[in-house]
Amino acid sequence: MSLAVRFDDIRKDFGPVRVLHGVSFELAPGRIYGLLGENGAGKSTLMKILAGYEAATTGTLLIDGQAQQFASSREAEAAGIVLIHQEFNLAEHLTIAQNMYLGHEKRRGWLLDDAAMRAEATRYLAQVGLKKPPDTKVRALIVAEKQMVEIAKALSRHARLLIMDEPTATLTPSETERLFTLMTKLKDEGVTIIYISHKLDEVEHITDEVIVMRDGRFVARGATAGLARQQMANLMVGRDVSDMFPDKVAVAADAAVALKVEGLVVPVWVEHLSFEVRAGEVLGFAGLVGAGRTEAFEAILGLRRRSAGRIEIGGRVVDVKRPRDAMRHGLTYLSEDRKGKALHVDLNLQDNLTLMTLEHYAHPLLDLKAGRAALKQAVGDFGIRTGDLSSRARMLSGGNQQKLALAKFLQPEPNVIVLDEPTRGVDVGSKRDIYFLIHRLAAQGRAVIVISSELIELIGLCHRVAVMRAGRLQATLDLDHLTEEELIAHATGTH
Amino acid sequence: MRPAPTEAAQSGRAMRLAHHLYGLGPLVGLVVLCITGTLLNHDFATVDNLMNVLTRTSFIGIIAVGETFVIISGGIDLSVGSMAALIAGSMIWLMNGLSAGVGGHTFAPLAIIAIGIVLAFVLGGLFGWAHGLLITKGRIEPFIVTLGTLGIFRAVLTWLADGGALTLNNSLTDLYSPVYYASLLGVPVPIWVFLVVAAGGTLILNRTAFGRHVQAIGSNEQVARYAAIRVDTVKIITYVLLGICVGVATVLYVPRLGSATPTTGILWELEAIAAVVVGGTALKGGEGRVIGTVIGAILLSVIANILNLTSIISVYLNAAVQGAVIIVVAFLQRGRR
């Protein structure tokens, strides 16, 4: 039950563009590897080649010394290699057992052998530590549990090498801890795990060895124990990122309250939330997934029903029924769901940028030239890297999409901007750009609210951090008390 | 991604080129059809015949322009044929009633026709508004809502007409008929109206905030909602616009035959939706062009016309040929995104 992998001079071209420039390295069985690289470094492509989703243009993939060219993910699976996608491949309406055996159903004659599938599913669920009956519909599971199902499914296919792409992006710290326990257990059973993540603290915590890629090339590898987080980041970016965060500028003592919320109640999600943020201040919101942070702000914007709560913007009580009302009062909200709620990936950059402020361009016919000028301005101001101003938002890399989304939600010139997970799935270089942008916004006298699951980000960025747990505000930590330990203690209720 | 900008630029350009070619597809098809028609029958390429084709296209064409907005926003309206029939019936019923006099008052024929026309617009707008409300506030699938009203509208007309025909009084027919039969600068009135509606539709879709919002909602409704667009209002307006388009088409249609029967406007919804789809608008919404719809509508009626003029395929198979065209177009548009 061991599987050794060797990449030998793997190249991959997409049309005229080479995304992998001859990558060579090997992986020993039964270890956890952290695969690091900025977005677009080529790690996903390489993993897709390994898991049979893509074919290498040239080069050889050796599995246990044998040259292999998988024609499909099914073939790779048969060899024991399974890629667990960031977005799960589970049919929501089917049960856990049905999902685990989808396409590999056990039969008795012409009929399905449900009893056998259920029994085996139960065994694998126990192995991954998911206490759910195999008849549970997948749509009734939370994200962490779906992930467990994916892993159980991989084990049921006798996986010997698991590739996990950002598995903890949507997990709470305790769920992450549970996943890591499982990963360690699988490793002890001889499974090789390739762990792709932007979260360097987790890479440091769980992996045995780190492999860094940049620009489609293998850059470095080394034992995790021998690499500091800073070194990993530097290797990924190819330059020093010791200065990820700008210096905090103290909020003026007489700064006015920009947004004040009192007694906000959102049915099911939020209980009596009150807070305020002042002009020039960066206020963080910490908490586990499901703590009600996103829901609170969606309710403030009128995207979700609120049953009580008083909202003051700029000192005046306002009645916000829909996002348009909030925007008119100088409040905008950038969702954490970039492709689902923040950007029209199928529309071009200009249409995306100007969407919220079209009335500025309509006289009453739209002034397309002015829109173009605004796009050029934004591309410069926000450092959006694009070769073609007319391309669709889909064509941008994650970091550049996020910058475009930021530019879009800043077009209405809000006095208060709420940024929900502003650096999720964004490469290190873009992260730094976004941190500096946030501080520029604060310096311009805007109030910035940052909802984030990355504690380092909240600590590095914010003047104060509000911690929510199960729909309630647990504490608001100021600079003197802003530590990872305090944040986790309040977020998990162990303070 | 370091190589990303060039990659993005190249595939972006390639995508736009492909996009333009797809955009030209219906036009190319129309040109090919016209050449075929000319070769098959010398009567095809006469001014009279072309005017005839375009006049007949205008009803469906005008409705299809409205339908383009609804489909781009991610909706659909199946009821347009029944709606046209009911509006036609209501117009005739009201105009006949007015011409008989109300409470001793008599009305000038011109005034009666003007009232009839206003009624058509108002009814169309009201029906569209009702659709929009049920779909947005009532949160019912547009398919279901308009499937329901498809039945309701036609049944109400049949009831109004008592199963037979509602026929416009002779005294009004003469005054009203120029709306369909007259020409301006040698071009029949319906074609002018069609042109104005198409040009207006193009302008509204591409160059106004409303048009952009329609596209944004169809492309991704959730993103539009988060971008502070009043999604419900915009959707309702698309249905109202379509209703008014149906009203306009009906105003042009009534003087043609001067009556409304339970079979008036039957299958117009299919022709209108087909014109939109053949014109390159994706049924799932987000993208589309009014000019494409116009070409699609013309293309479909040119097919019917060629079948009429030639004897290669029976004219009874007209709907079959149109159906085949729709499927072929859909086939060619696979995986466009």
Image (tube, rainbow, N blue to C red):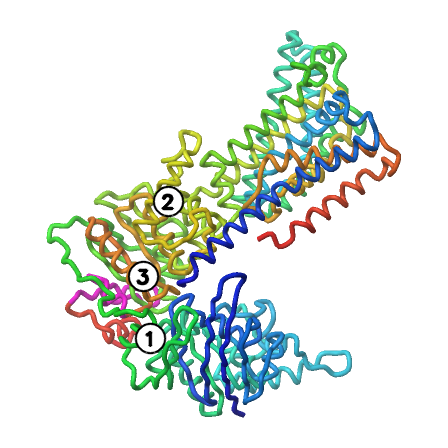
The quadrant holding residue A61 is bottom right
Whether marks 2 and 1 lie on the same chain: yes
SS class, disc 2: helix
Residue A292 pos. (x, y %): 36, 62
Q: Residues within 10 Å of mark 2 (few under 14, many from 20)?
A: many
- Residue flagged by tag 2: what amino acid is it? Leu
Q: Residue at x 61, y 27 (%)?
A: B123
CB contact under 8 Å: marks 3 and 2 = no
Q: Residue at x 27, y 66 (%)?
A: A457
Residue A451: assigned label: 3
**Foreground residue among B184 and A174:** B184
Instruction: Give how far apart the Cα atoms at labels 3 and 1 are.
Output: 19 Å
Q: Residue at x 39, y 65 (%)?
A: A425
Q: Which residue is mark 1?
A: A200
- Residue flagged by tag 3: what amino acid is it? Ile
Q: Residues within 10 Å of mark 3 (few under 14, many from 20)?
A: many
Number of marks in the image? 3
Residue A255: assigned label: none
Instruction: Give how far apart the Cα atoms at labels 3 and 2 are.
Output: 27 Å
CB contact under 8 Å: marks 2 and 1 = no
> Image height check: is A439 above or below B327?
below
Q: Is A367 positioned to the left or the right of B177 in the image?
A: left
SS class, disc 3: strand
Q: Which residue is mark 2?
A: A375
Whether marks 3 and 2 lie on the same chain: yes
Instruction: Give how far apart the Cα atoms at labels 2 and 1 are.
Output: 34 Å
